[in-house]
Image (cartoon, rainbow, N blue to C red):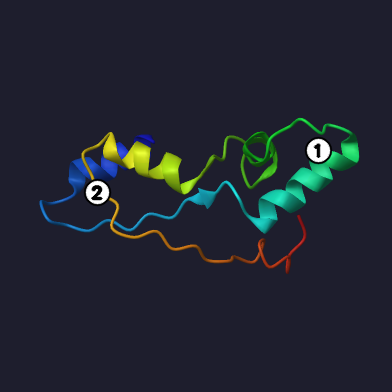
Amino acid sequence: MKCISEAARDLKPGGIQKIIVYSKFSSNGLMLWILHGFLKFKFFLSQEEIVFKYLESSGTKCYSNKEFKKNIRRFFLEVKTIKKYAGLGDLLSMPP
């Protein structure tokens, strides 16, 4: 959440910041869990752990709406809206 603290520091009063984060519950996350968890008999690995290890670069984090809002409030920011969009990975139109 270091990037959020930097964005909050630079944001002018009344300003709007748009942030893109990975959702904890996504078809891409489920696909990765099937490939790296289920098919390797690692049934107890969470989607969060799988995303951390295998999505894009190591260390990628994902959040539920509730977790994201909680983290945003730590920086005295307010969440106006949360919208979910399906990316190429979620549409399964690219290889894992």
Q: Is residue 35 above or below residue 75?
A: below
Q: Is residue 53 left or right of residue 80?
A: right
Coordinates of residue 31 in the picture (x, y in percent): 76, 53
Q: Is residue 25 left or right of residue 1?
A: right
Q: Mark 1 highlights which residue?
A: 37
Q: Mark 2 highlights which residue?
A: 78
Of mark 1 and mark 2, the one earlier in the sequence is: 1
From the viewer's side, name the closer residue of 23 and 15: 23
| Residue at horizontal 70 percent and vertical 41 percent from the top | 54
Q: Is residue 47 left or right of residue 2?
A: right
* Residue type, mark 2 in image: Glu
Q: Secondary structure at mark 1?
A: loop
| Residue at horizontal 18 percent and vertical 49 percent from the top | 11
Q: Is residue 81 left or right of residue 12?
A: right
Q: Which quarter shows the C terminus?
A: bottom right
| Residue at horizontal 21 percent and vertical 39 percent from the top | 76
Coordinates of residue 68 in the picture (x, y in percent): 41, 43
| Residue at horizontal 67 percent and vertical 61 percent from the top | 89
